[in-house]
Amino acid sequence: MSSEKTRFGLDETRIPEAWYNIIPDLKNPPAPPKAFAPDGTELTMDQIGEVLASLFPMECIKQEMSPERYIDIPGAVIDVYKTYRPSPLLRAKQLEKNLGLPGGVRIYYKYEGVSPAGSHKPNTAIAQAYYNKQEGITKISTETGAGQWGSALSIAGALFGVDVEVFMVKVSYEQKPYRRILMETYGATVHPSPTNLTDAGRHVLSIDPDSTGSLGIAISEAVEVAAKDPGTHYSLGSVLNHVCLHQTIIGQEAIAQMELADDEPDVVIGCIGGGSNFAGIAFPYYQRKLEGKSNARLLAVEPKACPTLTAGEYRYDLGDEAGMTPQLLMYTLGHDFVPAGIHAGGLRYHGDSPLVSQLVHEGEVEATAVDQTACFAAAAQFARAEGILPAPESSHAILAAINEAKAAQQTGEDKVVLFNLSGHGHFDLAAYEAYNAGELEDYDFAQGVTLCEAGHE
């Protein structure tokens, strides 16, 4: 360990041997999913289980509602984790200096961009590909927004010998061609969604031929492909409980690394779209708070163009546009909502993790929404200070971290800020080019559309 205790290398903390399951520690049990037959009859949980079993490996289904606080990580998954984990925790000393912060205000970040996909997404992609392979599944279909999840699953599929088909939100497909190339290089098939390949895609195009797509639409297409082929399963990169579970390796490592630094965060921050990277760093700190070892605030940061937690309704809603998924109790903007085409494609989801939504609803987690241009300004400032180019999604957490530090500076209080830098922005240079040229725009919720509105335009 370095004498300054500002950076921790890959061999200085151990990879956790189990994921942390927040469900047993919630104040109230999570609400079960709902699903309905075509005649409107509500399905029983056993019937919903049959639907889920056609889409997901049984181990992931078990993890969705598991009462076990810790779930062992399979050895084969840990072996792959070892190629890039533990991810480094760094103190942003140069950024602190750039901001003129006093010594009592310190900023740390957990850097997930060291993974092969350049983000936190392999943490669950590896696990899901492994469980599918164990069940004899030969192909996985999925959606991707900015391409981080699609890249991660493409890599995991290649490692375990499972074919991958990706429906990439059209606006991101066009904005980020190198993400598509990366996925295809790993052997995946990639389509710009909505497509003419599925009933769900054709339905959207019949309403809005120029649709830029959404994660809800892409999910519908991927689910349809899996539902029609018994050898294909569907895989989701966020939102669901088992996905959040797999990401908790981030927060567990961060806790151990912060202890090495002899420091404790006062606020833990993550950007949020579906909720996976935020859950990954925040859920273990929720447990730490219950143990009386932390008083940290947990802060989720979302775009004003898709402000699910700050402007959505807390209710049951479908996870996709076509209605092929069960309904989940979550904050939602409506399953047919299509956000404006911001560059943080991974945050353009109409809903949020039911677990994160429950914590927000119960006052355990705070949420805030920020503008695109302010996020890119913060990302550029961070890059020039720390030398790491952040993903547009991660820039939301950076902006919030800077704001927290500045607020503490103004009040004269000491504050330790920890945020999850969920991925690098090496495939997002077109977005940075637009920012550098002053061509980025801010969008708000009202500038998105629902499909029914698009049909009347």
Image: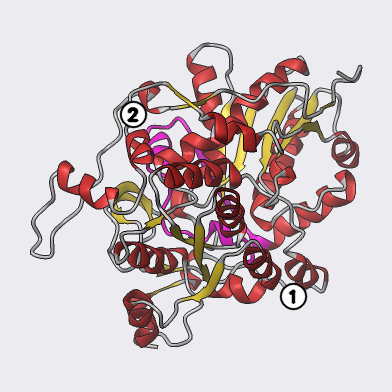
Q: Is residue 9 left or right of residue 65?
A: right
Give how far across and how far down residue 10 sits, in percent.
Answer: 77, 29
Q: Earlier in the sequence, mark 1 or mark 2?
A: 2
Please report the residue visible at 40 percent of the width from the left and 88 percent of the height from the top.
Answer: 457
Task: Please tell me in which quadrant of the rendered image residue 421 appears.
Answer: top right
Up/down of 434 relative to 382, above or below: below
Give how far across and how far down residue 20 sits, in percent.
Answer: 49, 26
Q: Is residue 361 among the parts visible in the rendering?
A: no
Neighbour class for label 2 at 10 Å: few (<14), some, many (≥20)?
A: some
Judging from the image, what secondary structure is the residue with disc 2 in?
loop
Please report the residue visible at 10 percent of the width from the left and 61 percent of the height from the top.
Answer: 40
Figure quadrant of the N terminus = top right
Identify which amino acid the numbered label 2 is placed on. Ser
Depth check: give the residue in front, 312 or 195: 195
Depth check: give the residue in front, 196 or 304: 196
What's drawn in magenta, residue-wise? 343-372
Give how far across and how far down residue 159 sits, in percent.
Answer: 60, 49
Q: Are marks 1 and 2 in contact (CB under 8 Å)?
A: no
Camera-side mark, 1 or 2: 2
Please report the residue visible at 29 percent of the width from the left and 29 percent of the height from the top.
Answer: 29
Q: Is residue 170 left or right of residue 11?
A: left
Q: Which residue is mark 2?
A: 66
Identify which amino acid the numbered label 1 is placed on. Glu
Q: Which residue is mark 1?
A: 439
Residue 370 on the magenta span: yes
Q: CA distance from mark 1 to mark 2?
A: 47 Å
